[in-house]
Amino acid sequence: MATLLDSLKTLVSPATGQIAERLGESEAAVSSGVPTTFASVLGGLVNKAADPSSFRQVFDFITSRPAGANLPDDASSVVGSFVAGGAVAANGTKFLNMLFGGQTNALGNLLTRTLGFKNPASGGKLLSLAGPLVLALLGNKVREGGLDSAGLANVITSEKDSINAAMPAGLSSLISSATAPQVETPEWNRPTTTARQFADVPPSESEGRRWVWPVVGLATLALVWFALAHKNNTAARQAAVVDTTTRIGSVVGTAGGEVAGGLGTLGAFAKRTLPNGTELNIPANGIESQLIGFIEDTNRPVDTTTWFEFDRLNFATGSASILPESDEQIDNIVAVMKAYPNVKVKVGGYTDNVGSPEANKKLSQQRANAVKQALVAKGVDASRLQAEGYGEQHPVADNSTEGGRAQNRRIALRVTAK
């Protein structure tokens, strides 16, 4: 019978080339890095299995995933490119945080160094891919074998030697220093990025779209999990100095990863060459494509009502710390800004209504500032950027539900000059 590690390698093997392309790494590096990355996640499980009480929490999370989160029986069907992962990616990241606590980002950095990746974020991105796949494989294992917590722990520990042999050096000490989880399950932006339209109101603008990144999964997992979460659009008017939203296009809650009828996803990734010769690999419906389209369309003037929501940007819980998985989208926005030197933008930050309004306003401002600072750090002149946080103002969904609150946490851009 194939081991867990062998099953995972077989599952991903057909897509190694596409993964390498998305990461900007060599296929050889990714091919050798996939087993190491999966072994790292399984190593975290081996560590948890040594403590029945702690492992029980992991087991409960694994078995709480809906049956639709299982992997397809035919591993060869799992071929495709990376996509932003909605609730699936969020669950995968929560799973990783249960295993590694505050050391998840450190593990991504360790993988980057160990595997010799060129891009500092590649280790974290590959880890973000591994999380949902391991989670789904274990869910299948439990259901097919009728395993309880102790049974699954036995399966994992029986493979301890092969897992340890494939893990990167230094992982054991990193696991031993792990603390309680400190990163929230990512609240992913809706994969359908359309511009939000706000009512005719002065520049106290409104919404922005949520933090998210791009934990990524394989596109074909859409057959199984990926009914991606999306955008919101509502019609709402506010008074004078407050922007409001009239949502165009549409959306869904991310909690179950189900797509609302008629909604698309981020779309296929494709090469796009900018005026300065920079080539981006971006999704057809992502913020990058929407932003470029607006900038280049001479029939669409700058206004105070049109916003473009981030769809692969994510923050650590309760902080303005942008997670490494977000680097790709930040880099893409920087490239767009450099290709269109006359463009200026405003970053807007929003939260749900959990906590005090004052704290939410402060956090949203800090997160908007963090995005602005990230753009500046990568070469965009600060004079071309503004940032404002609106806290829990202007919700686009019902804050009484988990899915609604997820939609209300967002970060967006508005073009102020082009």
Image: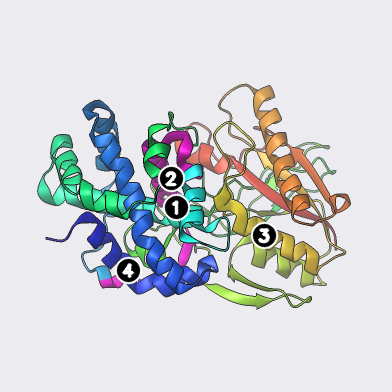
Where does label 3 land, which residue? 331
Identify which residue is drawn at 73% across, 75% down. 274
Residue 128: mark: 1
Q: Position of residue 52 (x, y in %)?
A: 21, 29
Q: Position of residue 174 (x, y in %)?
A: 42, 38
Depth check, front residue: 151 or 284? 151
Q: Amino acid at mark 4?
A: Val
Return the disc, 3 or 2, that comes first in the chain's sequence: 2
Return the disc, 1 or 2, that comes first in the chain's sequence: 2
Task: Classify 10 Å Cα crowding around label 2: few (below 14), some (14-19), many (20 and above).
Answer: many
Return the disc, 4 or 3, that comes first in the chain's sequence: 4
Magenta stretch holds residue 172: no
- Which secondary structure, mark 4? loop
Return the disc, 4 or 1, that comes first in the chain's sequence: 4
Where does label 2 land, which residue? 93
Q: Main secondary structure of the magenta part?
A: helix
Identify which residue is drawn at 50% across, 63% down. 265
Task: Classify 10 Å Cα crowding around label 1: few (below 14), some (14-19), many (20 and above).
Answer: many
Residue 1: mark: none
Quadrant in the picture for residue 293: bottom right
- 222 displayed left or right of 11: right
Note whether 68 is above or below 238 in the view shown. Answer: below
Q: Position of residue 77 (x, y in %)?
A: 29, 72
**Can the viewer see residue 69?**
no
Q: Amino acid at mark 2?
A: Thr
Q: Amino acid at mark 1?
A: Ser
Magenta stretch holds residue 102: yes
Q: In the image, which residues are magenta? A: 76-105
- Which secondary structure, mark 2? helix
**Can the viewer see residue 45?**
yes
